[in-house]
Amino acid sequence: MLSGTIMQTLILIWVTFRTDWKKEVDEARKRLDKWEDKKEAVLM
């Protein structure tokens, strides 16, 4: 069980450091803008 926990931790650290965070922020911003547009359309 301990070796599984260590392996999972190492994989999560590896994924975290390899992630392009600027790209992720841009994609999240696009999704938020899409929801904001829908919210404004419903209010009108």
Image (cartoon, helix red, strand yellow):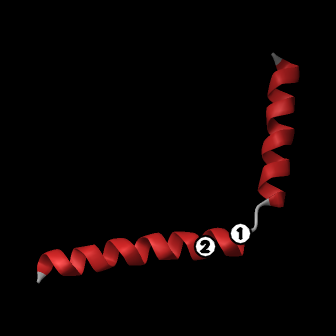
Taking the spot 49% from the left edge, 75% from the top edge, the residue there is 30
* Residue at x 86% of width, y 31% of height: 7
| Disc 2 residue type (three-letter) | Val
- Please say if 3 is above or below 41: above
Q: Quadrant of the C terminus?
A: bottom left
Q: In the displayed structure, would residue 10 be above or below residue 7?
A: below
Give SS at disc 2: helix
Q: Nearer the viewer, residue 10 or 19?
A: 19
Q: Which mark is residue 25?
A: 2
Counting other residues with Cα less than 10 Å from the Cα at mark 2, is it few (<14), some (14-19), or many (20 or more)? few
Q: Quadrant of residue 33?
A: bottom left
Question: Which amino acid, by three-letter code, is at mark 1?
Answer: Trp
Tags 1 and 2 touching, CB below 8 Å: yes
Q: Is residue 10 above or below residue 6?
A: below
Q: Going by the image, does 20 lie left or right of 26?
A: right
Please provide percent x and percent y for residue 16: 77, 55
Is residue 24 shown left or right of residue 30? Answer: right
Q: Residue at x 30, y 79 (%)?
A: 37
> Cα distance, mark 1 to mark 2?
6 Å
Q: Residue furthest left?
A: 44
Using the image, tell me which numbered label, if any, was put on residue 30: none
Based on the displayed image, in which of its 4 quarters is residue 35 positioned?
bottom left
User: Dot 1, how many residues are within 10 Å of its Cα: few (below 14), some (14-19), or many (20+)?
Assistant: few
The percent coordinates of residue 41 (x first, y second) are: 19, 79
Numbered marks: total: 2
Q: Report which quarter residue 26 is drawn in.
A: bottom right
Quarter holding the N terminus is top right
Circle 1: element type: helix
Q: Which residue is mark 1?
A: 21
Residue 4, x across and y down, in percent: 82, 23
